[in-house]
RNA sequence: UCCUUCUUAGCUCAGCUGGUUAGAGCACGUGACUGUUAAUCACGGGGUCCCUGGUUCGAGCCCAGGAGAGGGAGCCA
């Protein structure tokens, strides 16, 4: 007989039909009722065991975490908490779970503890909901771009370009690191390394993405990204996933429109397809909020926040306007910022970004046209000579979720800027070729996938939205 | 990397001004009960109080150093 997924079984009209269910025990109550879960939904199916006619050694083995196979009849439940249940005819223990050793209990565990047993936390309601949502969002991203005719490009994970300066890199080598070959000057001789040069893990697929956009018009990448920064925060990982679309014939406004449309599309997709999981996380978050002092509580529930995001357009302002708002704010005048805003050109601190998003506009904000000194070399220079066509999308509670720009397509301006910033035009000659042969207006952005998952799930630590987080001093599993 | 808080049973957490044998709930074990919803009731086992050193008649508690974790900041997605 074919196995029925729990999610399916719960939706089936019971007519005393036979059904085969397999899954893991969440709890066993009253020597009689098994709450069984197979990961298809957070809702368990109740298995009713006739304990008077079941071998006691079998009953003893029905413990939290054990894998079971049950052949039984699907009936309308006599009890209150569920509509259908399965009366077991035959019950097989597929895999035992020693009750004294299995760390998960039918009770609330701290996220910190579950992070230490990340190999088992998939079996909890919270992480079940989080990772089904992560899957839905990943799928929705591909669906969105596919429907728009974008070509999905796999940019390299090992790269020899360390010119972009997006962050500290992880070196890739097959040298014996205790004894690497040296050249005549006593320096490590990378000519003898696997690739014949110094190589690293990618910090961004953007530059390669631009090459493809100059052929397919619209492309995107969606892959792992590595940064060896010593960042210990709730929103940084050493290994994370990033979506990087790159579009020919787009200016900055087209770029912002696409980013906003993408974010709304994937949130809507999660809402339409994983509403139960969102509801579960909504309740979970609401309960957590209750523990906080009133002033620290957020004014929106998770569902309200997502709905609000879907129904309102993102606020678009320039960096210069943002500085004006911050300068004039009571917060600044009363010196409540740790870093006071008093002149044009300073980089915005996260307290400033949070003020704009969470206090002033109370919705996602797109900041554009930053001073060129604080942005990357490839961003298109404005006529004012001071600013570049950059855009950052700031989300409440998350901060920067998207960073992008219109790219500098004018060869001369690009080369001048690279020289100013000490970036080797020789090493990036291949990149400059796009500006030599058929250069055109184009734009793109990077969307941090885990930050998106954070926003949609309402989780607050990025380590809880990726299965096995890699952070400084931590690479377990 | 900086600032800050924390580390006591498998988990979540109490532990008074430094004082005798370190507690609770859950989990686990045994028994009872049997339409339960994190089942309930009774009984029971369970501790390197993060580590090292110091102060003291006496340290879970005070001091110094170290390790790990949480939160905030920087870097950024």
Image (cartoon, coloured by chain):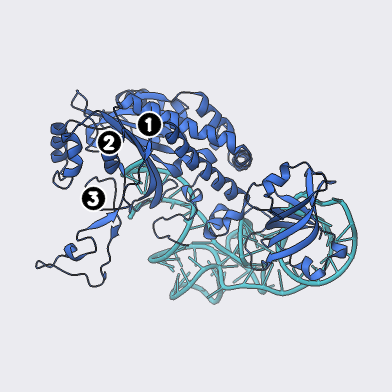
Chain colours: A blue, B cyan
Q: Which element carries disc 2, helix, strand or loop? A: helix
Q: In the rendered view, does B46 fall on the left or right side of A295? A: right
The dot on residue A162 is 3
Q: In the image, residue A18 lies at what x, y percent?
A: 78, 52
Q: CA distance from mark 1 to mark 2?
A: 52 Å
The residue furthest left is A184
Q: A18 or A351, which lies in front? A: A18
Q: Which of the marked residues, 1 or 2, is nearer the chain's N terminus?
A: 2
On screen, residue A382 above or below A69: above
The residue at which mark 1 appears reads as A335
Which of label 2 and label 3 is nearer to you?
2
The residue at which mark 2 appears reads as A215
Q: Quadrant of the N terminus of chain A?
A: bottom right
Q: A438 or A140, which lies in front? A: A438
Q: In the image, residue A259 lies at what x, y percent?
A: 40, 31
Q: Which element carries disc 1, helix, strand or loop? A: loop
Q: In the image, residue A41 lies at what x, y percent?
A: 64, 46
Q: Which of the marked residues, 2 or 3, is nearer the chain's N terminus?
A: 3
Q: Which residue is at a point 31% across and 45% down the rendered structure image?
A: A204
**Chain containing the residue with disc 2:** A
Q: Which element carries disc 3, helix, strand or loop? A: loop
């Amino acid at each position: 007989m074919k196995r029925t997924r729990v999610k399916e079984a719960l939706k089936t009209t019971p007519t005393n039909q036979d059904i085969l269910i397999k899954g893991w025990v969440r709890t066993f109550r009253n020597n009689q009722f098994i709450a069984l879960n197979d990961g298809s939904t957070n809702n368990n199916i109740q298995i009713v065991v006739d304990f008077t006619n079941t071998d006691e050694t079998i009953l003893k083995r029905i413990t939290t975490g054990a894998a079971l196979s049950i052949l039984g009849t699907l009936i309308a439940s006599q009890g209150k908490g569920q509509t259908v249940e399965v009366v077991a005819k035959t019950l097989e223990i597929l895999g035992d779970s020693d009750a004294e050793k299995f760390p998960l209990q039918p009770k609330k565990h701290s996220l910190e503890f579950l992070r230490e047993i990340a190999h088992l936390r998939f079996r909890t309601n919270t992480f079940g909901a989080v990772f089904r949502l992560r899957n839905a969002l990943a799928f929705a991203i591909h669906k969105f771009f596919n429907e728009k005719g974008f070509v999905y490009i796999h940019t390299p994970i090992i790269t020899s370009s360390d010119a972009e300066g997006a962050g500290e890199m992880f070196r890739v080598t097959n040298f014996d690191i205790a004894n690497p070959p040296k050249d005549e000057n006593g320096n490590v001789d990378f000519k003898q390394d696997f690739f014949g040069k110094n190589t690293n893990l990618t910090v961004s697929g953007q530059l390669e993405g631009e090459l493809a956009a100059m052929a397919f018009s619209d492309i995107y990448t969606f892959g792992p990204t590595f940064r060896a920064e010593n960042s210990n925060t709730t929103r940084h990982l050493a290994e994370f996933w990033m979506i990087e679309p790159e579009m020919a014939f787009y200016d900055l406004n087209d770029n912002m429109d696409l980013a906003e449309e993408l974010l709304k599309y994937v949130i809507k997709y999660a809402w339409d397809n994983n509403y139960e999981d969102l509801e579960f996380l909504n309740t979970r978050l609401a309960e957590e909020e209750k523990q906080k002092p009133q002033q620290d509580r957020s004014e929106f529930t998770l569902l309200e926040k997502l709905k609000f995001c879907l129904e309102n357009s993102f606020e678009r302002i320039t960096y210069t306007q943002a500085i004006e708002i911050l300068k004039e704010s009571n917060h600044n005048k009363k010196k409540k910022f740790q870093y006071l805003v008093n002149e044009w050109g300073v980089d915005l601190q996260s307290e400033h970004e949070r003020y704009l998003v969470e206090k002033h506009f109370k919705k996602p904000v797109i900041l554009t046209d930053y001073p060129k000194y604080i942005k990357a070399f490839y961003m298109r220079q404005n006529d004012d000579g001071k600013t570049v066509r950059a855009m950052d999308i700031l989300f409440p509670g998350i901060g920067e979720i998207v960073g992008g720009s219109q790219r500098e397509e004018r060869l001369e301006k690009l080369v001048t800027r690279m020289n100013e910033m000490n970036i080797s035009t020789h090493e990036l000659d291949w990149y400059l070729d796009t500006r030599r042969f058929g250069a055109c207006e184009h734009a793109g952005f990077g969307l941090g996938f885990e930050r998106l998952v954070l926003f949609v799930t309402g989780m607050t630590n990025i380590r809880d939205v990726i299965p096995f987080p890699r952070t400084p001093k931590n690479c377990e599993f």
